[in-house]
Amino acid sequence: MTTSTSPTAFAPGTGATAPVRVATIGAGRIGSSHTTLISRHVPDAVVAAVADPVDGSADRLAAAVGAGFATTDIDDVLGSTDVDAVLITAPARSHSDLVCRAAAAGKHIFCEKPMAVTLDEADRAITAAEDAGVILQVGFNRRFAPGFAAARRAVDDGRVGTPQLLRSLTRDPGPWQADPARVPQWTIFLETLIHDFDTLCFLNPGARPVSVHAFADALIRPDAKSSGHLDTAIVTIAFDNGAMATAEASFSALYGYDVRGEVFGSAGMATAGNGRTTDMTFYGAAGVEIDTARRDTILLHDAYVGELSAFVDAVRTGSAAVVSGSDARTALQIALTAIRSVETGRTVGIDEVA
Ligand SMILES: NC(=O)c1ccc[n+]([C@@H]2O[C@H](COP(=O)([O-])OP(=O)(O)OC[C@H]3O[C@@H](n4cnc5c(N)ncnc54)[C@H](O)[C@@H]3O)[C@@H](O)[C@H]2O)c1
């Protein structure tokens, strides 16, 4: 079903200065946020279309942002000559297939993490984009958060020296109220910690992960552990430049959304992330307080705008994607190795999962 929402709001351009015409595939939580950010904060792009198989979802989002059309059929978007690029914000297990289909249709691709959930799928997605000559950027937003980007600059310009110890953590805001039965198995590695695995590689540039040891448990919902639910995990990673790293995640931090990174080296240390929504600190009779974020879309607002702007710039200029399919494959390989470690209870070499 295709419905017209606000055709006059969308004016396809032509030539080098024309805006990039973006279509969203998956009008859920992050798809709605990304689409709204594009429409408000990325002047070189317009929202051409929204697609979602659930009746009404695409219509609502398309109407809210003044998109050209809404549809429940992804092929309407892939076949449209009014669409230059797609944002893939559907559930994780559909990503690699959608990347391949979008590439075959000649659309540039911004794909939310994880780009794939197996290495074969990842390879197919990377090859499809290369063969089609389209941009493929993956949604590792932390690289665009100002503090994380500054930490990487401190590594690049030598202030950190040789990285020796790294940390990255993601604690989702609590209380966690989802139904564990609706959370796909291994989500904590494939969808949560995958950000941290990418962050650790980003802050240790040029190094390759070589082995992984992971522990995971259901500390928030122990009643669901017997059905495979995991909501708390810690992962250690050894890199081939000698650096050692830890990543940790929890689905429920009662004090707010907590995303932090650290790289300690031979010459110094850089840290990033503090959970604050503003730099105001309140001092009162009861003590000292800061305001913390309850949503990723608030804490990482600037990072989301940054990654979407970078994608649109890459499409306009033909430059390489800032976060590539290969980067996504590396983070996925760490995630799959961590899963193997949990399954076997031992340290697993990265090449054992190939
Ligand atoms: N980078 C980040 O910070 C971040 C944050 C949140 C979510 N994500 C990722 O984004 C993806 C979506 O997460 P979400 O929280 O928005 O999920 P969601 O369930 O809120 O939304 C998914 C949407 O996709 C639609 N959909 C289902 N199958 C589809 C298909 N085959 N084609 C197109 N649309 C389809 C659903 O109807 C739904 O509207 C996940 O991979 C998740 O890990 C990334």
Image (cartoon, rainbow, N blue to C red):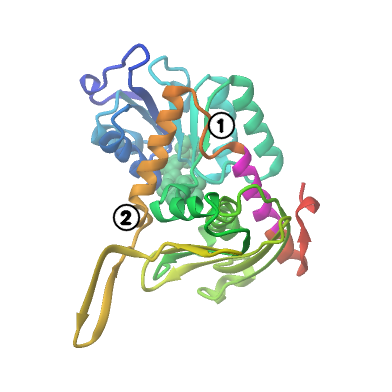
- Judge whether residue 336 is colored magenta: yes
Residue 107 lies, in percent from the top left, at: 49, 23
Q: Which residue, given by chain and number where applicable, does mark 2 sit on? A: 298
User: What is the span of residues highlighted in magenta in the rendered image?
Assistant: 326-337
Residue 169 in view of the camera: no
Residue at 57%, 41% in the rendered image: 115
In magenta stretch: residue 89: no
* Crowding near the residue tagged with mark 1, few <14, some 14–19, many ≥20 C-alpha atoms within 10 Å: many
Query: Disc number at residue 86?
Result: none
Question: On screen, 135 above or below 298?
Answer: above
At x 55%, y 59%, the residue is 160
Q: CA distance from mark 1 to mark 2?
A: 27 Å
Kindly state the secondary structure of the residue where label 1 is placed.
helix
Q: Which mark is residue 99?
A: 1
Which quarter shows the N terminus? top left
Q: Is residue 305 visible?
A: yes
Query: Foreground residue, 211 or 192?
Result: 211
Horizontal placement of 276 versus 215: left or right? left
Under circle 2, the secondary element is helix
Residue at 33 percent of width and 17 percent of height:
17
Q: Quadrant of residue 194?
A: bottom right
If you read the primary sequence from the N terminus, does the residue marked by circle 1 or circle 2 appear first? 1
Measured along the vertical axis of the image, is residue 30 above or below residue 192? above
- Magenta highlight: main SS: helix
On the image, the x and y values in percent for residue 298 come to 32, 55
